[in-house]
Image (tube, helix red, strand yellow):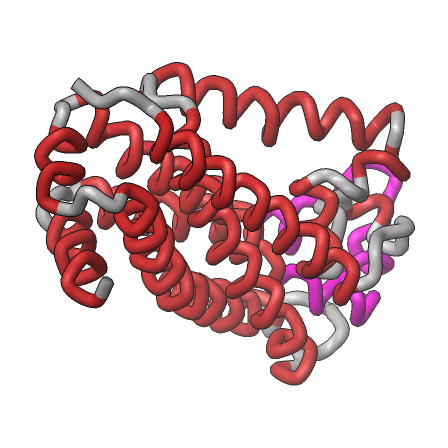
Amino acid sequence: MISLIRSEFRKVFSTKLLFILIISAAAFALLQVFLLIFVTPPGLEEANQLMNPQYVKTITASAGSASIFLLILGIVAMSGEYRIQTITSTFLVTPVRWKVIVAKMATFAILAFFIAILLWLIVSITAMLLLTTQDSAPFEWSGALEILGGTVLGLVLYGILGVAIGSLITSQVAAIIIALIWFLIVESLLSVFFDTFANWLPGGALNAILQTNGNPEAIDADLLSVPVGALVLIGYAAVFAIAAAFFTTKRDIT
């Protein structure tokens, strides 16, 4: 298994995609930080939002919003093997197919762990520096540390979900489109019309462990508790991972 994980790391670092997505994820997270600090949502007074300690704390949750990039990275890495047909030689070398899936998931879980810490540091330091230029509640590192655990867990599980989706939907384009439509559009619409139900979806569980729903006008909205949100998201990742391993074992590979 260790040799398989090493092989997967070599594959990941042999392309520029990882670095492109890390830069994109950091840029996306920093954009959210700038918007949360400098752009006043309609109906809110700037002083009201920035003087709210909970609001200031959840600015650091912007790092967790980059989880969609880990999802895409996992999808591309897994489905890409089917696209360029390297999966055939991989399974010839390692006939026990589920080990390949587990190794790839472990690889992306490790990558996501370190990427999450990096993004959290970038976002936290940026937020701390920018808030010193504003009339706001003080930036508390203790509050930021509360978000760190959710950020790490969210990115790790979304990376695993990405690998699983890429294994279940082997068409790279289809897998990316379906995932983006579901996570960015369908779940967003469901959260508007069926917010209680949406809390139990992957995005809702992610919001729970990040302690924010991403809406500056409703930072006190009802969410699942952090432990429940973590269990729900772990459950989704586990179900998709098991399904990916099972169907990969049964699938004909040419």
189 and 231: which is toward the camera: 231
Total labels drawn: 0
Judged left or right of residue 43, residue 205 is: left
Dominant secondary-structure state across the stretch colored magenta: helix
Q: Is residue 174 above or below residue 3?
A: above
Asked whether residue 246 is drawn in magenta, I would say no
Q: Position of residue 193 (x, y in %)?
A: 88, 24
Judged left or right of residue 149, residue 28 is: left
Q: Residue at x 70, y 68 (%)?
A: 57
Q: Is residue 175 visible?
A: yes
Q: Residue at x 81, y 57 (%)?
A: 49
Q: Is residue 40 visible?
A: no
Q: Position of residue 34 (x, y in %)?
A: 55, 51
Q: Is residue 134 above or below residue 221?
A: below
Give the magenta range: 35-60
Q: Is residue 166 above or below residue 131?
A: above
- On-image quarter of the C terminus: top left
Q: Residue furthest bottom?
A: 142
Q: Position of residue 252 (x, y in %)?
A: 27, 20
Asked whether residue 59 is drawn in magenta, I would say yes
Q: Quadrant of residue 211?
A: bottom right
Q: Position of residue 6 (x, y in %)?
A: 16, 62
- On-image quarter of the N terminus: bottom left
Q: Quadrant of residue 16?
A: top left
Q: Quadrant of residue 198?
A: top right
Q: Residue at x 71, y 66 (%)?
A: 56
Q: Is residue 84 above or below residue 33?
A: above
Q: Residue at x 40, y 59 (%)?
A: 109
57 and 107: which is toward the camera: 107
